[in-house]
Protein backbone atom coordinates (compact mmCIF):
# COMPACT_ATOMS: atom_id res chain seq x y z
CA UNK A 1 0.00 0.00 0.00
CA UNK A 2 0.26 2.35 0.36
CA UNK A 3 0.09 3.39 3.93
CA UNK A 4 2.93 1.27 4.71
CA UNK A 5 5.04 0.44 7.53
CA UNK A 6 6.90 0.83 10.14
CA UNK A 7 9.66 3.19 10.91
CA UNK A 8 7.79 5.12 13.59
CA UNK A 9 8.53 2.35 16.06
CA UNK A 10 12.13 3.54 16.00
CA UNK A 11 10.96 6.75 17.63
CA UNK A 12 11.27 7.26 21.39
CA UNK A 13 7.48 7.64 21.70
CA UNK A 14 6.77 4.29 20.06
CA UNK A 15 5.79 2.46 23.22
CA UNK A 16 2.84 4.79 23.76
CA UNK A 17 2.00 5.37 20.11
CA UNK A 18 -1.60 5.45 18.92
CA UNK A 19 -2.62 3.43 15.93
CA UNK A 20 -0.57 0.68 14.34
CA UNK A 21 3.19 1.25 14.69
CA UNK A 22 2.69 4.87 15.66
CA UNK A 23 1.13 5.79 12.33
CA UNK A 24 -1.86 7.27 14.17
CA UNK A 25 0.16 9.62 16.37
CA UNK A 26 -0.10 13.39 16.11
CA UNK A 27 2.42 15.08 13.84
CA UNK A 28 2.80 18.68 15.01
CA UNK A 29 5.39 20.59 13.03
CA UNK A 30 5.35 18.27 10.01
CA UNK A 31 3.71 18.93 6.66
CA UNK A 32 0.40 17.21 5.90
CA UNK A 33 -1.02 16.16 2.52
CA UNK A 34 -3.49 18.59 0.95
CA UNK A 35 -5.88 18.65 -2.00
CA UNK A 36 -5.29 19.02 -4.84
CA UNK A 37 -2.32 16.67 -4.97
CA UNK A 38 0.36 18.27 -7.13
CA UNK A 39 3.37 16.16 -8.12
CA UNK A 40 6.72 17.24 -9.54
CA UNK A 41 8.66 14.52 -11.34
CA UNK A 42 11.46 13.61 -11.15
CA UNK A 43 11.67 15.39 -7.78
CA UNK A 44 8.88 13.44 -6.09
CA UNK A 45 10.65 10.13 -6.67
CA UNK A 46 13.05 11.44 -4.02
CA UNK A 47 12.58 12.07 -0.28
CA UNK A 48 10.24 14.56 1.43
CA UNK A 49 11.93 15.31 4.76
CA UNK A 50 9.24 17.76 5.90
CA UNK A 51 6.85 14.77 6.14
CA UNK A 52 7.24 12.29 8.98
CA UNK A 53 6.80 8.97 7.15
CA UNK A 54 7.74 7.75 3.67
CA UNK A 55 8.50 4.55 1.75
CA UNK A 56 9.72 3.06 -1.53
CA UNK A 57 8.05 -0.34 -1.59
CA UNK A 58 8.56 -2.96 -4.31
CA UNK A 59 7.05 -6.44 -4.54
CA UNK A 60 7.36 -8.92 -7.41
CA UNK A 61 5.70 -12.13 -8.57
CA UNK A 62 8.22 -14.37 -10.30
CA UNK A 63 8.52 -17.78 -11.99
CA UNK A 64 11.49 -19.91 -12.96
CA UNK A 65 11.83 -21.98 -16.12
CA UNK A 66 9.91 -24.87 -14.55
CA UNK A 67 6.94 -22.65 -13.62
CA UNK A 68 7.68 -22.56 -9.88
CA UNK A 69 6.34 -19.39 -8.25
CA UNK A 70 8.44 -17.02 -6.12
CA UNK A 71 7.88 -13.68 -4.43
CA UNK A 72 10.34 -10.87 -3.82
CA UNK A 73 10.24 -7.73 -1.65
CA UNK A 74 12.56 -4.69 -1.49
CA UNK A 75 11.52 -1.83 0.78
CA UNK A 76 13.14 1.33 2.10
CA UNK A 77 11.36 3.27 4.86
CA UNK A 78 12.18 6.78 6.06
CA UNK A 79 10.95 8.37 9.28
CA UNK A 80 11.84 11.77 10.73
CA UNK A 81 12.46 12.79 14.32
CA UNK A 82 12.01 16.42 13.23
CA UNK A 83 10.73 18.09 10.03
CA UNK A 84 14.02 18.95 8.35
CA UNK A 85 16.89 17.31 6.49
CA UNK A 86 19.86 18.15 8.75
CA UNK A 87 23.47 17.31 8.04
CA UNK A 88 25.79 14.57 9.20
CA UNK A 89 24.98 12.98 12.53
CA UNK A 90 22.60 15.84 13.29
CA UNK A 91 20.18 14.60 10.60
CA UNK A 92 16.81 13.61 12.15
CA UNK A 93 16.15 11.10 9.38
CA UNK A 94 16.10 7.37 10.23
CA UNK A 95 16.06 4.66 7.58
CA UNK A 96 15.05 1.00 7.60
CA UNK A 97 15.29 -1.57 4.81
CA UNK A 98 13.44 -4.87 4.43
CA UNK A 99 14.23 -7.55 1.85
CA UNK A 100 12.61 -10.95 1.41
CA UNK A 101 12.33 -13.88 -0.98
CA UNK A 102 9.39 -16.28 -0.73
CA UNK A 103 9.23 -19.78 -2.21
CA UNK A 104 6.43 -22.33 -1.83
CA UNK A 105 8.34 -23.84 1.12
CA UNK A 106 10.55 -21.08 2.58
CA UNK A 107 10.40 -17.40 3.46
CA UNK A 108 13.77 -15.63 3.71
CA UNK A 109 13.83 -12.16 5.28
CA UNK A 110 16.39 -9.67 6.51
CA UNK A 111 16.48 -6.07 7.76
CA UNK A 112 18.87 -3.10 7.76
CA UNK A 113 18.76 0.03 9.96
CA UNK A 114 20.60 3.30 9.29
CA UNK A 115 20.92 6.97 10.21
CA UNK A 116 20.48 9.65 7.58
CA UNK A 117 23.05 12.35 6.86
CA UNK A 118 26.14 10.12 6.86
CA UNK A 119 25.71 8.38 3.50
CA UNK A 120 24.68 5.02 4.93
CA UNK A 121 21.19 5.26 3.44
CA UNK A 122 19.16 7.68 1.36
CA UNK A 123 17.42 8.46 -1.91
CA UNK A 124 18.27 10.77 -4.79
CA UNK A 125 15.68 11.65 -7.42
CA UNK A 126 17.73 12.18 -10.59
CA UNK A 127 19.38 9.92 -11.44
CA UNK A 128 17.19 7.78 -9.21
CA UNK A 129 18.97 5.86 -6.47
CA UNK A 130 17.61 4.42 -3.23
CA UNK A 131 20.06 2.57 -1.00
CA UNK A 132 20.81 1.29 2.46
CA UNK A 133 24.31 -0.10 2.99
CA UNK A 134 25.02 -2.20 -0.13
CA UNK A 135 21.37 -2.70 -1.12
CA UNK A 136 20.22 -0.53 -4.00
CA UNK A 137 17.32 0.29 -6.29
CA UNK A 138 18.81 2.54 -8.93
CA UNK A 139 18.81 3.57 -12.57
CA UNK A 140 19.28 6.45 -14.96
CA UNK A 141 15.56 7.15 -14.55
CA UNK A 142 12.55 5.67 -12.75
CA UNK A 143 11.58 3.48 -15.73
CA UNK A 144 14.73 1.34 -15.88
CA UNK A 145 16.14 0.11 -12.59
CA UNK A 146 18.53 -2.42 -11.13
CA UNK A 147 17.74 -3.86 -7.71
CA UNK A 148 20.01 -5.75 -5.33
CA UNK A 149 19.77 -7.00 -1.76
CA UNK A 150 21.27 -9.79 0.32
CA UNK A 151 20.77 -11.50 3.66
CA UNK A 152 22.36 -14.37 5.58
CA UNK A 153 20.74 -17.03 3.37
CA UNK A 154 19.66 -15.30 0.14
CA UNK A 155 20.48 -12.59 -2.36
CA UNK A 156 19.03 -11.23 -5.58
CA UNK A 157 20.09 -9.10 -8.54
CA UNK A 158 17.16 -7.98 -10.71
CA UNK A 159 16.50 -5.66 -13.64
CA UNK A 160 13.20 -3.79 -14.02
CA UNK A 161 11.69 -2.03 -17.03
CA UNK A 162 8.41 -0.09 -16.84
CA UNK A 163 5.88 -1.00 -19.54
CA UNK A 164 3.20 1.52 -18.56
CA UNK A 165 2.60 4.86 -16.84
CA UNK A 166 2.65 5.89 -13.20
CA UNK A 167 -0.66 5.35 -11.40
CA UNK A 168 -2.22 7.78 -8.90
CA UNK A 169 -4.52 6.44 -6.17
CA UNK A 170 -7.49 8.12 -4.52
CA UNK A 171 -8.16 11.66 -5.70
CA UNK A 172 -5.33 12.04 -8.24
CA UNK A 173 -2.78 10.87 -5.68
CA UNK A 174 -4.47 12.14 -2.51
CA UNK A 175 -5.35 8.88 -0.75
CA UNK A 176 -7.79 9.10 2.17
CA UNK A 177 -7.25 6.49 4.87
CA UNK A 178 -10.04 7.08 7.40
CA UNK A 179 -13.44 8.63 7.96
CA UNK A 180 -11.61 11.24 10.04
CA UNK A 181 -9.79 12.37 6.91
CA UNK A 182 -6.23 11.17 7.47
CA UNK A 183 -4.50 10.89 4.11
CA UNK A 184 -1.26 10.33 2.24
CA UNK A 185 0.19 11.12 -1.15
CA UNK A 186 0.22 7.78 -2.99
CA UNK A 187 1.31 6.74 -6.46
CA UNK A 188 2.57 3.48 -7.96
CA UNK A 189 4.44 1.99 -10.87
CA UNK A 190 2.62 -1.37 -11.27
CA UNK A 191 3.86 -2.12 -14.80
CA UNK A 192 7.42 -3.27 -14.26
CA UNK A 193 8.67 -6.32 -16.09
CA UNK A 194 11.39 -7.93 -13.98
CA UNK A 195 14.08 -10.55 -14.58
CA UNK A 196 17.23 -11.64 -12.84
CA UNK A 197 18.74 -14.14 -10.47
CA UNK A 198 17.78 -15.33 -6.99
CA UNK A 199 20.60 -16.82 -4.94
CA UNK A 200 19.15 -19.32 -2.47
CA UNK A 201 20.70 -22.00 -0.22
CA UNK A 202 20.20 -24.59 -2.98
CA UNK A 203 21.81 -22.43 -5.66
CA UNK A 204 20.97 -19.77 -8.22
CA UNK A 205 17.56 -19.52 -9.89
CA UNK A 206 16.85 -17.43 -13.00
CA UNK A 207 13.39 -15.84 -12.82
CA UNK A 208 11.08 -13.50 -14.72
CA UNK A 209 7.81 -11.83 -13.82
CA UNK A 210 6.12 -8.57 -12.94
CA UNK A 211 6.76 -6.05 -10.16
CA UNK A 212 4.79 -3.29 -8.44
CA UNK A 213 6.42 -0.27 -6.77
CA UNK A 214 4.48 1.91 -4.31
CA UNK A 215 5.49 5.42 -3.31
CA UNK A 216 3.77 7.03 -0.35
CA UNK A 217 4.40 9.78 2.16
CA UNK A 218 2.46 11.45 4.95
CA UNK A 219 2.83 12.55 8.55
CA UNK A 220 -0.20 10.91 10.22
CA UNK A 221 -1.74 8.48 7.71
CA UNK A 222 -3.91 6.57 10.20
CA UNK A 223 -6.46 7.69 12.74
CA UNK A 224 -5.77 6.82 16.36
CA UNK A 225 -8.47 4.12 16.40
CA UNK A 226 -7.07 2.12 13.47
CA UNK A 227 -5.08 -0.97 14.40
CA UNK A 228 -3.68 -2.28 11.10
CA UNK A 229 -4.46 -3.01 7.49
CA UNK A 230 -4.85 -5.70 4.83
CA UNK A 231 -3.48 -4.51 1.49
CA UNK A 232 -3.82 -6.31 -1.86
CA UNK A 233 -2.13 -5.69 -5.20
CA UNK A 234 -3.56 -7.97 -7.88
CA UNK A 235 -2.31 -8.41 -11.44
CA UNK A 236 -5.31 -9.96 -13.22
CA UNK A 237 -6.02 -11.20 -16.72
CA UNK A 238 -7.80 -7.97 -17.74
CA UNK A 239 -6.29 -5.31 -15.46
CA UNK A 240 -4.80 -4.57 -12.07
CA UNK A 241 -6.43 -3.89 -8.73
CA UNK A 242 -5.09 -2.20 -5.62
CA UNK A 243 -7.38 -2.45 -2.60
CA UNK A 244 -6.99 -2.12 1.13
CA UNK A 245 -9.09 -2.33 4.25
CA UNK A 246 -8.00 -0.53 7.42
CA UNK A 247 -9.17 -2.27 10.57
CA UNK A 248 -10.69 -0.13 13.33
CA UNK A 249 -10.96 -0.83 17.05
CA UNK A 250 -14.76 -1.20 16.89
CA UNK A 251 -14.51 -4.02 14.32
CA UNK A 252 -15.47 -1.93 11.28
CA UNK A 253 -13.24 -1.29 8.27
CA UNK A 254 -12.33 1.64 6.04
CA UNK A 255 -11.66 0.59 2.43
CA UNK A 256 -10.33 2.06 -0.78
CA UNK A 257 -9.47 0.67 -4.20
CA UNK A 258 -8.08 1.56 -7.62
CA UNK A 259 -8.87 -0.34 -10.82
CA UNK A 260 -6.11 -0.04 -13.45
CA UNK A 261 -6.69 -0.95 -17.11
CA UNK A 262 -3.88 -2.55 -19.17
CA UNK A 263 -3.11 0.84 -20.76
CA UNK A 264 -2.99 2.65 -17.41
CA UNK A 265 -6.40 4.29 -17.10
CA UNK A 266 -7.62 4.34 -13.50
CA UNK A 267 -10.89 4.38 -11.59
CA UNK A 268 -10.87 5.10 -7.85
CA UNK A 269 -13.47 3.48 -5.59
CA UNK A 270 -14.58 4.93 -2.25
CA UNK A 271 -15.07 3.38 1.16
CA UNK A 272 -17.28 0.28 0.96
CA UNK A 273 -16.91 -0.56 -2.73
CA UNK A 274 -13.99 -2.93 -2.19
CA UNK A 275 -14.55 -5.92 0.10
CA UNK A 276 -12.00 -8.36 1.49
CA UNK A 277 -13.16 -11.14 3.82
CA UNK A 278 -10.99 -13.84 5.43
CA UNK A 279 -11.87 -17.39 4.39
CA UNK A 280 -9.31 -19.47 6.32
CA UNK A 281 -6.49 -18.89 8.80
CA UNK A 282 -3.01 -20.33 9.31
CA UNK A 283 -1.04 -20.70 12.51
CA UNK A 284 2.07 -18.57 11.98
CA UNK A 285 4.29 -18.65 15.05
CA UNK A 286 1.30 -18.88 17.36
CA UNK A 287 -0.64 -16.15 15.53
CA UNK A 288 -3.84 -16.80 13.60
CA UNK A 289 -3.21 -15.12 10.23
CA UNK A 290 -5.84 -14.99 7.43
CA UNK A 291 -4.03 -16.54 4.46
CA UNK A 292 -7.02 -17.17 2.19
CA UNK A 293 -9.42 -14.33 1.33
CA UNK A 294 -12.45 -13.60 -0.79
CA UNK A 295 -12.00 -10.27 -2.57
CA UNK A 296 -14.79 -8.47 -4.44
CA UNK A 297 -15.20 -5.27 -6.39
CA UNK A 298 -18.75 -5.48 -7.75
CA UNK A 299 -18.34 -2.49 -10.06
CA UNK A 300 -15.76 -4.49 -12.07
CA UNK A 301 -17.28 -7.94 -11.66
CA UNK A 302 -14.38 -9.05 -9.47
CA UNK A 303 -15.15 -11.97 -7.16
CA UNK A 304 -11.96 -13.90 -6.48
CA UNK A 305 -10.32 -16.09 -3.88
CA UNK A 306 -6.69 -15.33 -3.11
CA UNK A 307 -4.34 -17.87 -1.56
CA UNK A 308 -0.94 -17.34 0.02
CA UNK A 309 1.83 -19.05 -1.93
CA UNK A 310 3.46 -19.69 1.44
CA UNK A 311 1.27 -19.12 4.52
CA UNK A 312 4.40 -18.80 6.70
CA UNK A 313 5.48 -15.50 5.06
CA UNK A 314 6.02 -13.72 8.39
CA UNK A 315 8.34 -10.70 8.43
CA UNK A 316 10.20 -11.16 11.73
CA UNK A 317 11.57 -7.62 11.62
CA UNK A 318 11.69 -4.77 14.15
CA UNK A 319 7.95 -4.40 13.71
CA UNK A 320 6.58 -7.79 12.62
CA UNK A 321 3.98 -8.20 9.87
CA UNK A 322 2.91 -10.67 7.16
CA UNK A 323 3.90 -10.08 3.54
CA UNK A 324 3.92 -12.52 0.67
CA UNK A 325 2.85 -13.49 -2.86
CA UNK A 326 -0.67 -14.72 -3.57
CA UNK A 327 -2.40 -16.74 -6.28
CA UNK A 328 -5.77 -15.45 -7.60
CA UNK A 329 -8.65 -17.66 -8.77
CA UNK A 330 -12.34 -17.07 -9.50
CA UNK A 331 -13.95 -14.50 -11.79
CA UNK A 332 -10.42 -13.43 -12.70
CA UNK A 333 -7.09 -15.25 -12.66
CA UNK A 334 -3.73 -13.82 -11.74
CA UNK A 335 -1.11 -13.27 -9.08
CA UNK A 336 -0.43 -10.55 -6.57
CA UNK A 337 0.88 -9.56 -3.18
CA UNK A 338 -0.74 -9.31 0.24
CA UNK A 339 0.46 -7.32 3.25
CA UNK A 340 -1.18 -7.65 6.67
CA UNK A 341 -0.20 -5.60 9.71
CA UNK A 342 -1.31 -5.47 13.32
CA UNK A 343 -1.58 -9.23 13.86
CA UNK A 344 1.17 -9.53 16.49
Image (cartoon, rainbow, N blue to C red):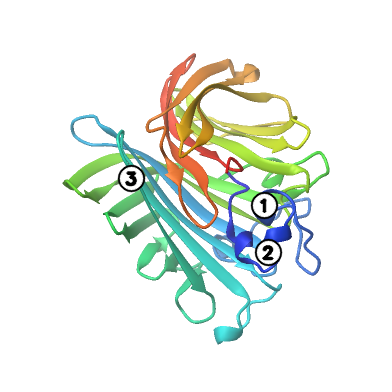
Q: Is residue 237 above or below residue 40?
A: above
Determine whether, in the image, residue 277 is placed left or right of residue 96: right
Q: Find disc 3 in the rendering and name its residue.
A: 194
Dot 2: element: loop
What's the CA distance linking mark 1 and mark 2? 12 Å
Residue sitting nearer the eye, 183 or 258: 183
Residue at point 64%, 24% (across, down): 275
Determine whether, in the image, residue 210 is placed left or right of residue 45: left
Figure quadrant of the N terminus? top right
Whole-percent x, y for residue 56 in the image: 51, 56
Q: Is residue 305 above or below residue 87?
A: above
What's the CA distance linking mark 3 and mark 1? 26 Å
- Precedes in sequence: disc 3 or disc 1: 1
Which-is-in-front pick, marks 1 and 2?
A: 2
Q: Residues within 10 Å of mark 2 (few under 14, many from 20)?
A: many
Residue at point 38%, 63% (across, down): 136
> What label sits on residue 52 in the rendered view?
2
Residue at point 38%, 31% (across, down): 309
- Precedes in sequence: disc 1 or disc 2: 2
What's the CA distance linking mark 2 and mark 3? 31 Å
> What label sits on residue 185 in the rendered view?
1
Q: Is residue 121 above or below residue 2?
A: below
Amino acid sequence: MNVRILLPLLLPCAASAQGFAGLGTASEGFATPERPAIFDFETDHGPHPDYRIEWWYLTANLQDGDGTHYGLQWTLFRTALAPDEGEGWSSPQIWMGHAAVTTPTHHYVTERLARGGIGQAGVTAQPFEAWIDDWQLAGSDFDTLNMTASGPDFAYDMDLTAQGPLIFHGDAGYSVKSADGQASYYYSQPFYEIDGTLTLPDGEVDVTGNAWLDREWSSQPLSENQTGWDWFSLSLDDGKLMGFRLRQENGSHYTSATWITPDGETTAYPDGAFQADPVSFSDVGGRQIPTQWNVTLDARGVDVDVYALNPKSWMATSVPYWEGPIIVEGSHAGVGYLEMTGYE
